């Protein structure tokens, strides 16, 4: 993997982890485009660490509060919101790893993501701020997050839609969605680290890995900041149209045997 490829893959991971268009699906496409299908687990782990750094920088006050106050309401909101994804991930880990490797379903998953994003605009802006979020809100949003274990179902997209359904205002919906990504990303890194300890590590230069990590951190930081501000006044339909076009292109390539 060249340094420019590492930079581009980091850019893809950083932007698409927080834009509602699916980071796993785009990362699969990026690796496939560069012929790096075998450079999977170790590379994914480093790129996830990059996006985790971005989240820690932006949410350092909230995360320090959780560390200092492990029995606070915010801590329980994050725990409850994470439980559905943990249950689904543990029960169906092997199945989802298999479909992630083949990419056979990602075209359809991009289309499904688009449907949710398009429908989100019909939901009236809610009234709930961070202090108003209930444990049931966190559980419902977390259940939507669990569905994003499919490779091209957007985690941020579905959690934002779920938050809007639960009457969070648009800014808070994005804010809580990205905050809830913290335990999800930490969990992904831990699972990947366990798998790495059991197998062989891909032969990728440390300089390329660091470039990918830094790139994903920088673009992840920019994506979070931009998306929270964007959602205050703008529609999600532009992202729906984008993933629909991408899904149709992928399906057409698959049907003609070119993907």
Image (tube, grey):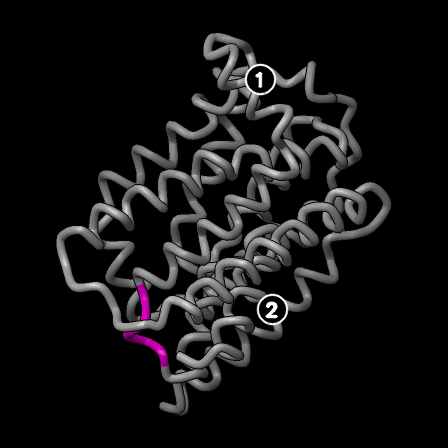
- Identity of the residue drawn at 63% across and 54% down: 19
| Residue 163 among magenta residues | no
202 horizontally vs 60: left or right: left
Quick one: 11 or 94, which is closer to the camera? 11
Residue 240: horizontal and vertical position, in percent?
66, 61
Could you classify mark 1 by the number of other residues whose Cα lies within 10 Å: few (under 14), some (14-19), or many (20 or more)?
A: some
Quarter of the image where one finds residue 15: bottom right
**Secondary structure of the residue carrying numbered label 2:** helix
Residue 244, numbered circle: 2
Residue 27: horizontal and vertical position, in percent?
46, 67
**Secondary structure of the residue carrying numbered label 1:** helix
Which quadrant of the figure contains the C terminus? bottom left
Main SS of residues in magenta:
loop
Q: Nearer the viewer, mark 2 or mark 1?
A: 1
Residue 136: horizontal and vertical position, in percent?
53, 18
Which quadrant of the figure contains the N terminus? bottom left
10 horizontally vs 91: left or right: right
Q: Give the residue furthest to the front.
A: 207
Could you classify mark 2 by the number of other residues whose Cα lies within 10 Å: few (under 14), some (14-19), or many (20 or more)?
A: many
Sequence-first tag of 2 and 1: 1
In the rendered view, would you say 183 is above or below 208? above
163 horizontally vs 95: left or right: right
- Identity of the residue drawn at 73% across and 21% down: 128
In the rendered view, would you say 119 is above or below 134? below
In the rendered view, would you say 87 is above or below 236? above
- Identity of the residue drawn at 50% across and 52% down: 50
Give the number of marks: 2
- Identity of the residue drawn at 51% across and 28% down: 140
Q: Read off the residue under disc 1.
A: 65
Residue 17: horizontal and vertical position, in percent?
55, 53
| Residues shaded magenta | 36-40
Q: How far, Cα to Cα, is label 2 from label 1?
A: 39 Å
């Amino acid at each position: 993997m060249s340094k420019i490829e590492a930079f581009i893959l980091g850019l893809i991971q950083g932007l698409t982890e927080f834009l509602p268009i699916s980071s796993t699906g785009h990362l699969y496409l990026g690796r496939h485009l560069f012929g790096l299908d075998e450079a999977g687990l170790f590379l994914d782990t480093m790129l996830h660490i990059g996006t985790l750094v971005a989240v820690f920088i932006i949410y350092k006050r909230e995360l320090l509060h959780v560390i200092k106050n492990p029995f606070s309401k915010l801590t329980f909101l994050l725990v409850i919101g994470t439980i559905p994804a943990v249950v689904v991930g543990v029960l169906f880990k092997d199945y989802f790893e298999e479909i992630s490797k083949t990419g056979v379903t990602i075209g359809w998953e991009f289309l499904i993501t688009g449907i949710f994003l398009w429908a989100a605009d019909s939901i009236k802006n809610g009234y709930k701020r961070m202090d108003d979020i209930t444990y049931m809100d966190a559980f419902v949003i977390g259940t939507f997050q669990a569905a994003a274990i499919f490779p091209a179902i957007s985690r941020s997209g579905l959690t934002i839609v779920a938050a809007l359904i639960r009457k969070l205002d648009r800014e808070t919906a994005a804010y809580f969605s990205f905050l809830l990504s913290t335990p999800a990303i930490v969990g992904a890194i831990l699972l990947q680290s366990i798998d790495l300890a059991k197998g062989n590590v891909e032969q990728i230069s440390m300089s390329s890995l660091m470039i990918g990590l830094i790139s994903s951190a920088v673009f992840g930081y920019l994506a979070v900041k931009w998306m929270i501000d964007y959602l205050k006044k703008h529609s999600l339909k532009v992202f729906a149209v984008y993933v629909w076009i991408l899904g149709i292109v992928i399906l057409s390539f698959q049907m003609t045997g070119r993907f």
